[in-house]
Image (spheres, helix red, strand yellow):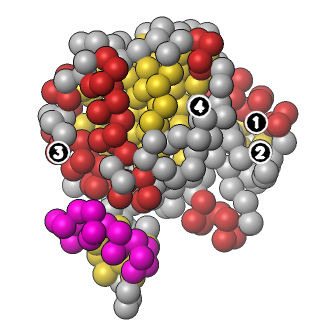
Amino acid sequence: MSIPMEIITDESLAENGFYWHEKLGVKVLINAVLEENGFANGFSTRIGGVSEFPENSLNLAGYDEDSEENIAENRRRFLSVFDKNYALASCWQIHSADVRVVKDLADAADGNCKMDALVSDAENVLLGVKTADCVPVLVADVKTKAFAAIHAGWRGTVQSIVINAIEKMRENYGTNPKDLICAIGPAATCKNYEIGQDVIDAFRENFPDSEHLFTPTKENHALIDLHTANNQQLKSIGVLPENIYVAPLCTMERNDLFFSYRVEKKLYGKTGRLMSVIARI
């Protein structure tokens, strides 16, 4: 059950497995269960940077809407939150369902792969995906120490990107889904994320039992619950329900904390990007 935005407290975050961490003005949401099981992780906010979105914003991507210097400084600040000097591995996200395997530190340096999820078991590598309303999912295997970062927009979700990522972990590292801990981060929630008939049809075609994900609004439109969709996909592949943690925060409602493409692109013509990261401690 989602918690109304106006009553979200540190206690309610804790009940969902999360807590806030602040360092040098940078505010990051941490999943405590991933951390306790040996995985550094964080979901960034817009707080503590140098970008003008409108000011002091921690924009971590979007080179067409910000300077390289700003993004580099913002990433330096964000990465300084973590006690270890990790190599950041990312990808050129294209709303696909493709998964990149990051083998080592040298492989981590290539950020031009056109993918939307990353998996690895390498030490000193921090996997990261960028979002601004889409769903970020962090996954950790407590047995093999493999891990994944996943960008699941509606296109990735309808193509089952979280399932693809876990299958890639199974293929490369012998992952058993029952050994996974998963954290689903802040994203646009079903209270605000309106989609049209094309998206509704895509979900109906790929998921016959998807009607419960929709809340009809007007003709040929509905609100969609991507948090629940990804949660159910994780369960469908064998992840234990008690090992899935969902951050009760909406990027469209909490513009004080998060960037929102759907809100800010319409208002200002641009928006920043958040980053969700995971690594072995």
Q: Which mark is drawn over residue 236?
A: 3
Residue under pointer 1: 71
Mark 2 or 3: the one toward you: 3
Residue under pointer 2: 63
Q: Is residue 63 magenta?
A: no
Amino acid residing under circle 1: Ile
Label 2 – label 4 distance at C-alpha: 14 Å
Residue under pointer 4: 90
Earlier in the chain: of badge 3 and badge 1, it is 1
The answer to the question of whether label 2 and label 3 lie on touching residues, with beta carbons closer than 8 A, is: no
Q: Is residue 51 left or right of residue 198?
A: right
Q: Going 16% across and 27% down the picture, which residue do you hit?
A: 178
Point out the image quarter for the N terminus.
bottom left
Which element is circle 2 on?
A: loop
Q: Is residue 211 above or below residue 231?
A: below
Earlier in the chain: of badge 2 and badge 1, it is 2
